Amino acid sequence: MVGAKNAVFPMEGTGMNYASVFIQKVWDIAGQIGYAEYFTQDKTQGTVDDHYFINRDANIPCIDIVHYESQRRDYPYFHHKHSDNMSIIDKNTLMMVGQVVLAVIINESGT
């Protein structure tokens, strides 16, 4: 979900509903460190996954950083398919997402 080549991450709807402040922090920092074209301002509809129930039932705000096929029709979609395997993982995409998440953690820690 965060490792395929040329993945693009819109703001996922469930996260926007329950944890928009966190999405905004992540996407703002992604833009600040040069990844705005990958962390787009596009929004998706809500997703029912484990994050939905953690947000709704446990009241723990959490978000999805996930590529959505509907955002780019030219992009091969692998999620929940047999083709979703290590051969499609792109180290540059993983590095980008890791850098964004690390930058958010550092920013939030105040160091």
Image (cartoon, helix red, strand yellow):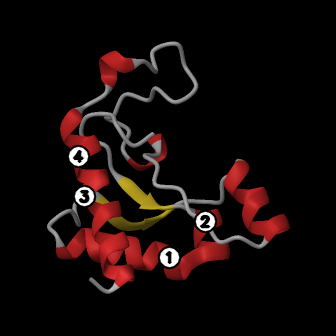
Residue 74 drawn above or below residue 32: above
Kindly identify the amino acid type of the residue bearing the numbered disc 1.
Answer: Phe
Outermost residue toward the right? 57
| Residue that numbered label 4 is attached to | 95
- Which element type, helix, strand or loop, lies under badge 3? helix
- Which element type, helix, strand or loop, lies under badge 2? loop
Q: Quadrant of the N terminus?
A: top left
Q: Tags 4 and 3 in contact by the CB under 8 Å rule?
A: yes
| Residue that numbered label 1 is attached to | 22
Residue 18 drawn above or below residue 43: below
Kindly identify the residue that appears in the image at 38 percent across and 55 percent down: 9
Mark sitting on residue 62: 2
Outermost residue toward the top? 82
Task: Return the disc, 1 or 4, that comes first in the chain's sequence.
Answer: 1
Residue in the foreground of this view, choosing between 101 and 81: 101
Q: Residues within 10 Å of mark 2 (few under 14, many from 20)?
A: some
Q: CA distance from mark 2 to mark 4?
A: 21 Å
- Find residue 14 and report its horizontal and vertical position in percent: 65, 64
Task: Return the disc, 2 or 3, that comes first in the chain's sequence.
Answer: 2
Within the image, what quadrant is residue 109 found in?
Answer: bottom left
Q: Tags 1 and 4 in contact by the CB under 8 Å rule?
A: no
